[in-house]
Image (cartoon, rainbow, N blue to C red):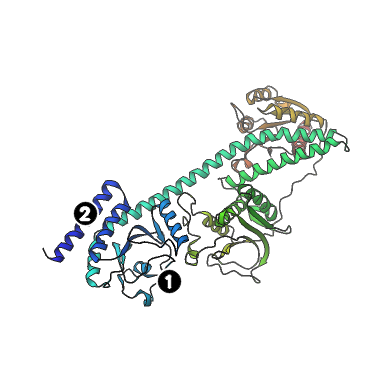
């Protein structure tokens, strides 16, 4: 048998063994190792690797003969070992080298003098073995380059003969690595689906928890408020109750923040106070980070209205804050958050993402003093699912979500970074001329007129509302059963001037109770209370006069009751005339 025949036999045997290994074990690394071992043996090379192109990176599935110095490149060596242990592969994120030129040029690369080759990197990473000679051959699937085999340091250099041997190996393995890429895309889509389902689950759980917490907070806040009003102003107990009330109100705000962040329904955008919303979001971020991280914020109040939802601002801060924390060394360092009002004529960022139109903008900037981002991957940080973190430690969605929110709000994002100095991300959001909605508290309370039916399955809340309403002079009937309430109203509709009901009730929900009354033509004003609004559809639900969120604010509650009672009494007067 001639040398060529023997070589061809070995190559075909390696291809068959690689295919068989994959089909039997579904192990890409083991299958790739079979091909690489044959390539190194056939070309008498010192070391080499097999890589596949995934998400614009070159993923190394097998390598042989690469002995990194543990002395001259200890940090990089340890990082490579740790990455390979967690992920099962290494990745080249830059194609500005000999390896990458095989992929970008879609052609064979032979470099027998890499030191003077313009395609080679300026220098190898510290600790990497010397690259004296190099041969890289692309792996094709149809017209697409799906990977490559790279070998190095054949003492005599490489020629057409070694190229032909590698091309024999790569020509039969394109389908193998195209299959690998398809599986990786399927995994990415599956992870995306799982992330979406997780977020939906979190939103559902948050809604249920919020409802329960707000039911607990309603009587706590209400009775503390009532007790404080009964005490003399100079009583020491007033100060104690103020502390209790402040803690309860902080719990109320925290529930609102969690709900805003986890809400999955489409919440309509409106003019919001950006500094106030940012401070709430920063408080939420602060509670999720260890005490070793300092958060410095420079947020000034003023005319800082934008058209957005609180949920979008929470997502901006939490995503940017989490990214900044992940960049810190040893989970210790500083995160700076600032807000600045600018105009595009004074400061027009060259984003490359979304051009800004003329006008006033609010620039939200989050800076860290962490590791920084390598220049070669800066242009990819906004790509969905792109991450430099180990498997299981990041989804690669953080900055893409930030970019998506900025784009939805007609703004843009800029990013700058320096290795070992930190990263700065700025989000530009257009200023709004619309004023923030203000509640009308000028409605006078009508004392001593009207009969109110209160329906809630939480007895402490029933007792609280009964006390509040009776103090205003109303007659009050209470029940913890919505079916009982329906019977009372049906028996004597004219008896009641207002129905106040909780949304979540056993047997018949508060909304269903109101709907039943509406459909039966019973025209009584109604107030629907809830600890959690799931969507905005109910705001226009027929039959509902007012919506109130728990925990209740006593003043707002009294105003809503006064408005509804006034309407009811005016209607009754008109009918009597």
Which residue is rendered at x = 67% and y = 30% of the image? 522
On screen, residue 554 versus residue 357, left or right, reads right
For the N terminus, which image quadrant? bottom left
Q: Where in the figure is residue 343, as x and y percent of width and height? A: 66, 68
Q: Residues within 10 Å of mark 2 (few under 14, many from 20)?
A: some
Q: Where in the figure is residue 82, as x and y percent of width and height? A: 44, 54
Q: Quadrant of residue 130?
A: bottom left
Which residue is rendered at x = 79% and y = 39% of the image? 242
Alpha-carbon span between mark 1 and mark 2 = 37 Å
Quick check: marks 1 and 2 in contact, CB under 8 Å?
Answer: no
Local SS, label 1? loop
Q: Quadrant of residue 340?
A: bottom right
Q: Which residue is mark 2?
A: 16
Q: Quadrant of residue 14?
A: bottom left
Which residue is rendered at x = 64% and y = 56% of the image? 307
Q: Which residue is mark 1?
A: 123
Q: Residues within 10 Å of mark 1 (few under 14, many from 20)?
A: few
Query: Of 107 and 80, which appears nearest the observer?
Result: 80
Residue lying farthest to the front in this orientation: 71
Above or below 111: residue 465: above
Question: How many dots with numbers?
Answer: 2
For marks 1 and 2 on the same chain, the one whose residue lies earlier in the sequence: 2
Q: For marks 1 and 2, give the one nearer the viewer.
A: 1
On screen, residue 51 versus residue 302, left or right, reads left
Query: Of 112 and 219, which appears nearest the observer?
Result: 112
Q: Where in the figure is residue 468, as x and y percent of width and height? A: 78, 32
Which residue is rendered at x = 50% and y = 54% of the image? 397
Above or below 109: residue 399: above
């Amino acid at each position: 048998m001639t040398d060529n025949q023997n070589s061809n036999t070995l190559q075909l045997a390696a291809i068959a063994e690689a295919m068989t290994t994959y089909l039997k074990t579904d192990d890409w690394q083991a299958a790739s190792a079979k091909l690489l071992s044959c390539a190194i043996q056939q070309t008498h090379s010192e070391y080499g690797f097999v890589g596949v192109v995934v998400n614009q990176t070159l993923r190394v599935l097998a390598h042989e003969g690469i002995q990194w110095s543990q002395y001259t490149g200890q940090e990089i060596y340890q990082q490579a070992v740790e990455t390979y242990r967690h992920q099962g592969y290494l990745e080249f994120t830059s194609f500005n080298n000999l390896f990458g030129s095989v992929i970008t040029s879609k052609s064979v690369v032979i470099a027998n003098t890499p030191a003077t080759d313009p395609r080679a990197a300026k220098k190898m990473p510290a600790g990497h073995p010397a690259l004296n000679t190099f041969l890289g051959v692309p792996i094709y699937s149809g017209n697409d380059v799906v990977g490559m085999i790279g070998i190095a340091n054949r003492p005599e250099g490489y020629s057409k003969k070694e190229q032909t041997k590698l091309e024999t190996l790569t020509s039969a393995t394109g389908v193998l690595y195209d299959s690998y890429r398809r599986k990786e895309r399927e995994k990415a889509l599956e992870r995306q689906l799982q992330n979406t389902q997780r977020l939906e689950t979190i939103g559902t759980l948050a809604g249920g928890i919020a409802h329960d917490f707000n039911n607990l907070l309603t009587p706590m806040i209400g009775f503390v408020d009532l007790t404080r009003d009964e005490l003399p102003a100079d009583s020491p107990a007033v100060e104690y109750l103020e502390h209790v009330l402040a803690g309860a109100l902080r719990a109320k705000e925290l529930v609102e923040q969690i709900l805003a962040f986890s809400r999955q329904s489409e919440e309509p955008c409106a003019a919001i106070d950006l500094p106030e919303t940012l401070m709430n979001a920063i408080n939420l971020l602060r509670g999720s980070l260890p005490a070793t991280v300092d958060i410095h914020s420079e947020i000034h109040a003023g005319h800082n209205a934008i058209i957005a939802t609180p949920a979008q601002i929470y997502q901006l801060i939490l995503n940017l804050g989490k990214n900044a924390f992940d960049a810190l060394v040893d989970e210790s360092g500083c995160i700076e958050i600032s807000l600045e009002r600018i105009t595009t004529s004074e400061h027009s960022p060259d984003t490359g993402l979304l051009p800004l139109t003329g006008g006033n903008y609010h620039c939200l900037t989050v800076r860290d003093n962490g590791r920084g981002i390598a220049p070669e991957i800066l242009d990819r940080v906004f790509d969905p699912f792109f991450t430099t973190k180990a498997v299981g430690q990041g989804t690669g969605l953080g900055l893409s979500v930030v970019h998506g929110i900025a784009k939805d709000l007609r703004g843009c994002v800029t990013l700058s970074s320096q290795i070992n100095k930190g990263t700065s991300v700025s989000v530009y959001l257009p200023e709004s001329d619309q004023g923030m909605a203000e509640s009308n508290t000028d409605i006078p309370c009508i004392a001593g007129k009207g009969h109110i039916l209160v329906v809630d399955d939480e007895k402490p809340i029933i007792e609280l509302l009964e006390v509040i309403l009776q103090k205003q002079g109303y007659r009050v009937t209470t029940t913890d059963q919505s079916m009982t309430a329906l019977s009372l109203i049906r028996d004597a509709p004219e008896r009641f001037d207002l129905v106040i009901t909780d949304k979540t009730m056993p047997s018949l929900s508060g909304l269903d109770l109101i709907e039943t009354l509406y459909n039966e033509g019973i025209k009584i004003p109604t107030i629907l209370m809830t600890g959690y609004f799931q969507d905005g559809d109910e705001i226009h639900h027929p039959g509902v006069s007012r919506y109130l969120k728990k925990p209740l604010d006593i003043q707002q509650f009294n105003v809503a009751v006064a408005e509804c009672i006034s309407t009811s009494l005016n209607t009754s007067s008109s009918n009597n005339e």
